[in-house]
Each structure stands twice: as C-alpha cells, then as structure tokens.
Image: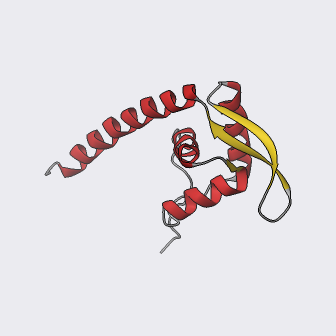
C-alpha cells in the first residue's frame, strides 16, 4: 500500500494559514507545525509553499508581520491576521463549507 498523500489540498493553504493565525500570531515554522498537529498529521505544509503563501497574504493586506524573539531566543518573523484577513477567512471558510457539503452529497449518491 502506498503512503497516504499529506500535501495540503490545492487552494486551501491560504485558508489554513488564516485560520491558524486567527488563534494567535506565529512564525512560519509554528504555522506549519500547528497545521500538522490540528490535522493529526493528515496535512504537512511544504516550507517553500508556506513562505510564498505568507508573502502573498501579506501583500494582499490579510497579514501583518514583525520580527520577534522565539521561545528559544532566535529571531523569526511573526505573522498575525489583520481585520481584512479575518473577513477573507470568513469568506474562504463559507466557500469551503459549501464545496465540502457538495462533495459529501456526491459521495453519498447510490450507484
């Protein structure tokens, strides 16, 4: 049996980042670790994809960032959700729920 795919589903990385940061500001490694923990290992975030997404979300005005000390005394860029980011999270969550419900209905169809 092949290993299960742990890639984040195309188009959901932004939503997962926004949701993770709605709880508290985090640095990139913390975001990736939190997504993996909360998904119970189902999703693993590629560091390159995460960095690109964080830059894109910051340019869009959905995240702010600042350099701070981590708990182990390293400097890291911490990201936090902006008001616009919260609105975007609400939109993406509603859209995801609508799509997931549609897929669930399709999968329940009897053949």
Judge whether 16 appears above or below 44 on screen.
above
- Residue 77 picture location, percent across and down: 79, 45
Q: How many marks?
A: 0
Q: Looking at this view, name the residue that lies furthest to the right.
A: 74
Q: Looking at this view, name the residue that lies furthest to the left.
A: 110
Image quarter for residue 106? top left
- At x 54%, y 43%, the residue is 22
Give the colour scheme shown. secondary structure
Q: Nearer the viewer, residue 110 or 10?
A: 10
Q: Nearer the viewer, residue 66 or 56?
A: 66
- Residue 109 picture location, percent across and down: 16, 48
- Residue 98 picture location, percent across and down: 31, 35
- At x 65%, y 24%, the residue is 60
- At x 86%, y 59%, the residue is 74
Judge whether 48 appears above or below 61 on screen.
below
Residue 55 vs residue 105: left or right?
right
Residue 75 vs residue 49: left or right?
right
Residue 19 vs residue 73: left or right?
left
- At x 27%, y 42%, the residue is 101
């Amino acid at each position: 049996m092949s290993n299960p795919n742990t890639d984040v589903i195309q188009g959901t990385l932004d939503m997962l980042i926004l949701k993770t940061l709605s709880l508290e500001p985090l640095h990139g490694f913390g975001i990736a670790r939190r997504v993996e923990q909360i998904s119970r290992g189902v999703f693993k975030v590629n560091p390159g994809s995460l960095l690109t997404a964080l830059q894109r979300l910051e340019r869009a005005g959905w995240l702010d960032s600042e350099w701070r000390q981590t708990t182990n005394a390293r400097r890291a860029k911490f990201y936090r959700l902006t008001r616009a980011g919260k609105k975007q999270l609400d939109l993406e969550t509603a859209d995801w729920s609508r799509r997931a419900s549609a897929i669930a209905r399709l999968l329940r169809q009897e053949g």
